[in-house]
Amino acid sequence: MPVRNAVAEWKGNLTEGSGSVKLGSGLFESAYSFNGRVEDGVGTTPEELIAAAHASCYAMALSADLAKAGFTATRLSAKSKVELRVGDAGLRISGIKLVVEGEVPGIDDAKFQAVAEGTKSGCPVAVALANVPITLEAKLVG
């Protein structure tokens, strides 16, 4: 299996410094900063990158799990909302909310909910995030 990579560079101290991050594929590059991480700012954040990885991984895994159950999704739209909290121990990812909307011919809502819930903890990114509480809101449409 291939190894994926990204490169991040940081200059300066935590609160006044800034950095850049670039995917190994070269398809994405962005600035990031501490202020952008804890407030609304320009550039990406580590949490946003985790959310992108989680949403895309979950959608692919759900597609595979639906196929194992005998269904082919016409469309799956997954959103991952990663919550960052500042506390006594510093910055911590305190929870992730997955929201998925699926258009899956022939499946009933109960079966869709069961497959979606089963996929929640099984996609590789979710396995890597096992110490973070993950909730799921799944909606069957169409």
Image (cartoon, helix red, strand yellow):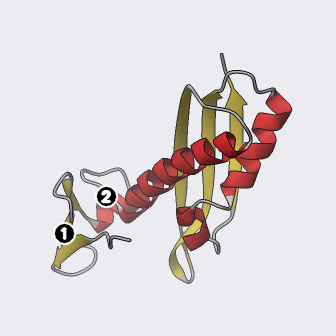
Identify the residue at the far top of this view: 142
- Depth check: 21 or 94 in front? 21
Give the residue type at disc 2: Gly
Neighbour class for label 1 at 10 Å: few (<14), some, many (≥20)? some
Which mark is first along the chain, 1 or 2?
Answer: 1
Q: Which residue shows up at 40% across the image and 55% down it?
A: 48
Image mark count: 2
Q: Which mark is residue 88?
A: none
Q: Which mark is residue 18?
A: 1
Describe the element under mark 1 as helix, strand or loop.
Answer: strand
The N terminus, quarter of image: bottom left
The C terminus, quarter of image: top right
- Depth check: 18 or 136 in front? 136
Q: Which mark is residue 36?
A: 2
Q: Which residue shows up at 19% across the image and 51% down it?
A: 27
The image quadrant that residue 26 belongs to is: bottom left
> Image height check: is 54 above or below 131?
above
Neighbour class for label 2 at 10 Å: few (<14), some, many (≥20)? some
State whether residue 137 appears in this view. Answer: yes
